[in-house]
Image: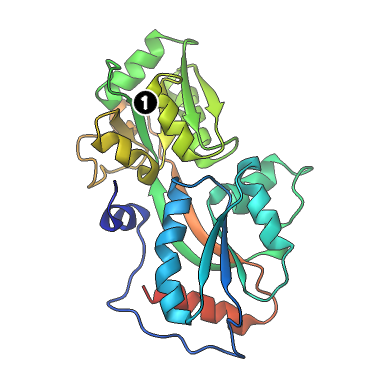
């Protein structure tokens, strides 16, 4: 299992030395806070939300509940937060898709406007994707991955946590820039996406480290590449795809958002509680 240090280092969270109570404004929060996650339990966004729940509870003196509402590339949870009362009690732990990418892909299908109906509370982290294959696959390096994909055009597949998310876009960039033809298979979250790589249902996955690391550690998956410019400390043997002659860099972000207008003082209280860990 990934440790808190692994996940925090991967997410690039900004921490301070110690937690301290946040002085509530107008009695906020007067009821338990809900953090909605648009993906199943066990994925990177879900793990980060749960890591934040306890310190937020300690900082604000109120219960913090993480609720998974998976589906529609994170938009089910995002829409629920956008349409919730603007009291700061319903927050969204979001990836890039539901607050940035989806509005360009699903203009006619989105039931909310992230620019007008959601207020960013904090940028939690910006993380690269890790490319994983089953341990039995004859791919061990980033160069092997590109060579294997080129030699098997049209016969391989890659999974991601949904259509339009940064993981899918990273895979499609690889196809475009490296001349490969790997079929995208979308899932409703990173956890099932990497599990099916381990079982052989799909060839590879572009995933968050938090979701893939347990299967890497138990030997069921092998990390062969990352989509950052540098190697990740947690995976020193996984080279950047850029080292395999593919100038590709792709990252995903985790953002704490909420329907928090009005009042702005509640935004400040939520931000302070996140910074307190």
Q: Does 31 appear above or below 189?
A: below
Specify the quadrant that holds the C terminus.
bottom left
Q: Up-down: is 151 above or below 5?
A: above
In the visual, does 12 lie left or right of 154?
Answer: left
Q: Is residue 216 above or below residue 146?
A: below
Question: Looking at the image, which residue is at 31% across and 32% down?
Answer: 225
Other-residue count near label 1 (Cα within 10 Å), few / some / many at <14 / 14–19 / ≥20: many
Work out whether residue 156 or residue 151 is closer to the camera in this orientation and state it: 156
Secondary structure beneath disc 1? helix
What residue do we see at 31% from left, 40% from top?
A: 214
Task: Classify 199 as above or below 91.
Answer: above
Q: Can you identify the residue that label 1 sits on?
A: 198
**Residue 13 on image: x %, y %:** 36, 62
At a point 48% along the width and 81% down the height, the residue shown is 60
Give percent across and percent down for residue 145: 33, 21
The picture places residue 96, in percent across and down from the top left corner, at 54, 50
Tell me if 1 is positioned left or right of 151 in this view: left
């Amino acid at each position: 299992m990934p440790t808190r240090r692994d996940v925090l280092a991967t997410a690039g969270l900004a921490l301070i030395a110690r937690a301290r109570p946040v002085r509530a404004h107008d009695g906020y929060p007067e009821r338990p806070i809900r953090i909605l996650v648009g993906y199943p339990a066990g994925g990177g966004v879900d793990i980060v939300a749960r890591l934040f729940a306890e310190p937020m509870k300690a900082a604000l003196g109120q219960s913090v509940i993480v609720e998974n509402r998976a589906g529609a590339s994170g938009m089910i949870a995002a829409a629920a937060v956008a349409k919730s009362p603007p009291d700061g009690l319903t927050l969204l732990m979001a990836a890039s898709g539901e607050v940035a990418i989806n509005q360009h892909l699903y203009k006619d299908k989105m039931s909310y406007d992230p620019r007008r109906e959601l207020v960013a509370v904090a940028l939690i982290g910006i993380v690269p994707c890790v490319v994983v294959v089953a341990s039995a696959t004859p791919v061990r390096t980033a160069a092997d991955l590109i060579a294997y994909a080129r030699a098997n055009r049209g016969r391989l597949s890659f999974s991601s946590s949904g259509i339009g998310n940064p993981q899918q876009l990273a895979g499609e960039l690889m196809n475009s820039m490296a001349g490969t033809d790997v079929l995208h298979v979308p899932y409703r979250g990173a956890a099932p996406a990497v599990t099916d790589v381990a079982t052989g249902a799909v060839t590879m996955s572009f995933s968050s480290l938090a979701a893939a690391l347990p299967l890497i550690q138990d030997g069921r998956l092998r990390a062969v590449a990352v989509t950052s410019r540098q190697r990740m400390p947690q995976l020193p043997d996984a080279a950047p795809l850029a080292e395999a002659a593919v100038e590709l860099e792709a990252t995903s972000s985790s953002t704490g958002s909420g329907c928090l207008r009005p009042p702005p003082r509640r935004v400040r209280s939520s931000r302070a509680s996140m910074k307190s860990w």
